[in-house]
Image: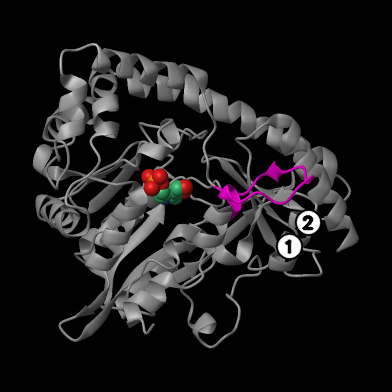
Amino acid sequence: MELSDFGTKLSSHSGILQLMDDIARPLGEGVRVRPLGGGNPARVAPVEQAYRRQMEHLLSSGEDFEDLLAHYDSPQGRVSFLEMAAGFFKKEYGWDLSSDNIALTNGSQSAMFYLFNMFSGTTKGVKKTILFPLMPEYIGYADQGIEEGTFVSLPSKCVFYDDRTFKYVLDCDAVASYLEHHPETGAIAVSRPTNPSGNVLTDEEIGTLSRLAHEYSIPLIIDNAYGLPFPDIIFTDNAKPVWNEDIILSMSLSKIGLPSIRTGIVIARKDIIKAVGNINAIAALATGSFGPALAHRMLESGELTKLASDVVMPFYKAKAEKMEGYIRKYFDGTDYYLHRIEGSIFCWIYLPSLKIPTLEFYSLLMKEGVITVPGEYFFFGSEQQKKGLSYPHEHYDKCLRLNYSGDDVLTEEGVEIIARLYRCYS
Ligand SMILES: Cc1ncc(COP(=O)(O)O)c(C=O)c1O
């Protein structure tokens, strides 16, 4: 079988493939699994009950259920949902938008795939790029560019605190200077909260990026999969929901209880939304109807955002505090730093004394039943990597991403084992 460049690139091994495979594949008989790896959100009872009520309502309302099953929605998404959502965002945040500013996709992962390839790759003879200004970034982006070498990135700056925590911060001057010297940049992209680090870009940082995007007439793509107003897995005060015509905001229903239903929501300028809808038609005909049908009345009534702020956010905040407690307990006496857990369902731990790369450390942990994600996958888009060298950030092969949303006992056991092995390999 001879695959095209597109086929070869997209069917090759990737970090995200390994991660999704690790979630789904059993480790072997008799191994007790501590799943701190993939991005599966937790089951949160009040959220599940709310969807169950919506489902029961659907099943008991005439032929609504059959209607839902039997029709394709429009390529831009379920029209009634788009209209309601536009009204909701306009009313809540004063955003100047209509249903023409919103499109649905089959998960925000596919939204990002569309967007990256809409704004990068050969354009009138120039190879356009996507700039990731805060590396490390989400593993799921790393292989999404169809053309080789279209993702570029800037290593984040790092601030250390004296309580063994640290925080990645945007190097605003470096971003401004990069854009000044690289007119081929087609878009800037960030996840907020950031997967993997749990960092939340501040309102000021987002303001800077948005102004730069405006100045260079390129979009700022904000992946809001964990953000505001839903699922609201944000624990800092310095983060407001934001959208303007320079921003493409990608949202998701996955981390508010519906990962299996695959619903992404893109808010952007009308011409961009039209393009996303057109790509949907070619790639998927239409988007799934179930997510918008289940969430419609909940978003409209404010129940979804209330569940996010009153249930989902406190749920993950409590989990994050427990995780920090486990880390402090078991890593005590070792040389470790924890990224401040400001949001998302992950924590990110920097192990400066690790004698082996985290890719190797990850395999040793797997043998003990602890699934993690090695840091290397979250650093991409550097010139050095094209030459076979490692990413120019001292954290490159010294960090692990740990999902803290699972069972507390298994999470604590996992952390205990990671700390034990760290002692052996430092
Ligand atoms: C930052 C980020 N963006 C996008 C996604 C994709 O989510 P979905 O396709 O389920 O909406 C994830 C999933 O973990 C994520 O962490």
Q: Quadrant of the N terminus?
A: bottom left
Q: Quadrant of the C terminus?
A: bottom right
Q: CA distance from mark 1 to mark 2?
A: 7 Å
- In the image, what residue type sits under mark 1? Ser
Residue 13 or residue 405, whichever sits in front:
13
Labelled disc at residue 426: none
- Residue 11: x and y in percent read 42, 71
Asked where in the image residue 415 lies, by quadrant, the reply is: top right
- Residue 51: x and y in percent read 37, 21
Horizontal side of residue 100 vs 142, given as left or right: left
Residue 43 in magenta? no
Label 2: state its secondary structure: helix
Residue 33 in magenta? yes
Magenta-tinted stretch: 22-38
Who's the residue at 79% across and 45% down the image? 30
Q: Is residue 139 above or below residue 406?
A: below
Disc 1 CB within 8 Å of nearest ligand 1 atom: no
Q: Please tell me whether the stretch drawn in magenta is mainly helix, strand or loop.
A: loop
Q: Which residue is mark 1?
A: 363
Q: Which residue is mark 2?
A: 367
Asked where in the image residue 359 lies, by quadrant, the reply is: bottom right
Marks 1,2: beta carbons within 8 A: yes
Q: Is residue 59 above or below residue 232?
A: above
Label 1: state its secondary structure: helix
Residue 398 or residue 146, whichever sits in front:
146
